Amino acid sequence: MKPLGPIPAGFAARDGVLAVDGIKITELIAQAGATPAFVYSSGMIRARVAALRAAMPEALALHYAVKANPFAPLLRLMGTLVDGFDIASGGELGMAREAGLDPSLISFAGPGKRDIELQAAIMQGVTLNLESAAEARRALTIAEKLGKTPRLAIRVNPDFDLRGSGMKMGGGAKPFGIDTDKVPALAREIVAAGAEWRGFHIFAGSQSLDGAAIAETQGQVLDLAVQLAQQADVPLPHLNIGGGLGIPYFNGDSPLDLTPIGAALGERLSNRPDVLKDTQLAMEMGRFLTGEAGVYLTTILDRKESHGDIFLVTDGGLHHQLAASGNFGTVVRRNYPVAIATRFGAEPEEEASVVGCLCTPLDRLADKGHFPKADVGDVVAVFCAGAYGASASPSAFLGQGPAREILI
Ligand SMILES: *Cc1c(COP(=O)(O)O)cnc(C)c1O
């Protein structure tokens, strides 16, 4: 028996069936048309943004990292809830614009931006978070040809990383951002070239459940930004301090307490040095805003026994839920929160593994979990599916195709 991850708050049983925002998943599947399907709750996303706003200093802007979940109706919802958007490709710029998001609220990070992507961003007034000096020069040249003033910020590669973070994005040699010693000269060059200078973007890590580490990193980010702005002798109109807020995926993980993080940041802001006095501060997040608000539903097609082990074979799999299968940046495979949605809340009776329909041993959604006895036709729910699910999984693999998605 291997433990399952903790089911996020807000999911309840109705007549023994999992309900999302009070609606039974059987009805939601009818609405989606079929399984496999992702269901995202706008109510849960709203509640998450509200909780974050309540805990963090009022002056802090909240940005959504589009890559976590670019589903068009969800992007439109985010457009009504947050203050800015972070994209990582020209494709995401297209999705953001299609969803009606204001380009002046969008910033574009990511190494390896093509000229046509830089051009589209500059034309539309999107801020570029520059990842190298060469990229800065390319952007300035393209802007000059277009007769546009580019909005430019520098993504800094900090010398520290977010302690306990699931994915380290700073510290040492990295393809992301510009090393701190090269930042002041480049900042001066950008300002001197007549660009609209937008300040710094400093992202030190992701998926941390350690509030003290997040608060400490935010302090280091503020100190670094001040130091770099002073060395460069440039103003700091905008500072993106990164994100890093994690969600509980695995047994033993606990949700973050936002209050001490907000209090520490508030304290730092009330004592901030003059360079930061007129700075618009922003935090960027993906999974923390949408991850727990999504559930992936897949129907059991077969129940089989092999050498005494029970396998529940579903119509979904890693082609929609790569992360839950343990193949998206995890070292040791652990079970996500998974439940038999059509027997939700029933006592567990047997050990079973939930597998997908792909012909590979990697396709396992739950390994030796303790479940109520489930049969063909029952529906399995994989939780924490609102971020890095549909768009971060190889849906074309084995000719399967994408899952349905609905926002309720
Ligand atoms: C991926 C990414 C994010 C979002 O990370 P989450 O863990 O989903 O919050 C934010 N900023 C940058 C620069 C990223 O690369």
Image (spheres, rainbow, N blue to C red):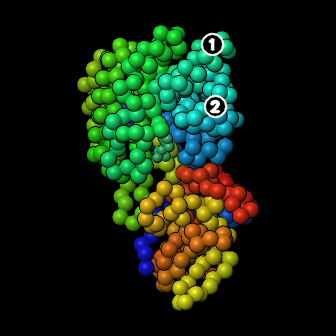
Relative horizontal placement of residue 202, taking residue 98 as reference (left or right): left
Amino acid found under the numbered disc labelled 1: Glu
Q: Which mark, residue 114? A: 2
Q: Is residue 117 above or below residue 311?
A: above
Per the image, the residue denoted by label 1 is 144
Residue 380 place in picture, x, y as percent: 59, 70
Q: Residues within 10 Å of mark 1 (few under 14, many from 20)?
A: some
Q: Nearer the viewer, residue 131 or 364?
A: 131
Amino acid found under the numbered disc labelled 2: Arg
Residue 226 place in picture, x, y as percent: 32, 23
Q: Secondary structure at mark 1?
A: helix
Q: Residue at x 52, y 49 (%)?
A: 290
Residue 261 appears in the figure: no
Residue 395 place in picture, x, y as percent: 67, 57
Q: Nearer the viewer, residue 305 or 53?
A: 305
The image quarter containing residue 108 is top right
Residue 149 place in picture, x, y as percent: 59, 14
Q: Between marks 1 and 2, how big is the CA–CA gap? A: 17 Å
Q: Secondary structure at mark 2?
A: loop
The image quarter containing residue 137 is top right
Relative horizontal placement of residue 160, taking residue 357 as reference (left or right): left
Q: Residue at x 54, y 51 (%)?
A: 387
The N terminus sits in image quarter: bottom left
Q: Earlier in the sequence, mark 1 or mark 2?
A: 2
Residue 288 appears in the figure: yes
Relative horizontal placement of residue 29, taking residue 3 as reference (left or right): right
Q: Nearer the viewer, residue 279 or 152?
A: 152
Q: Which mark, residue 25? A: none
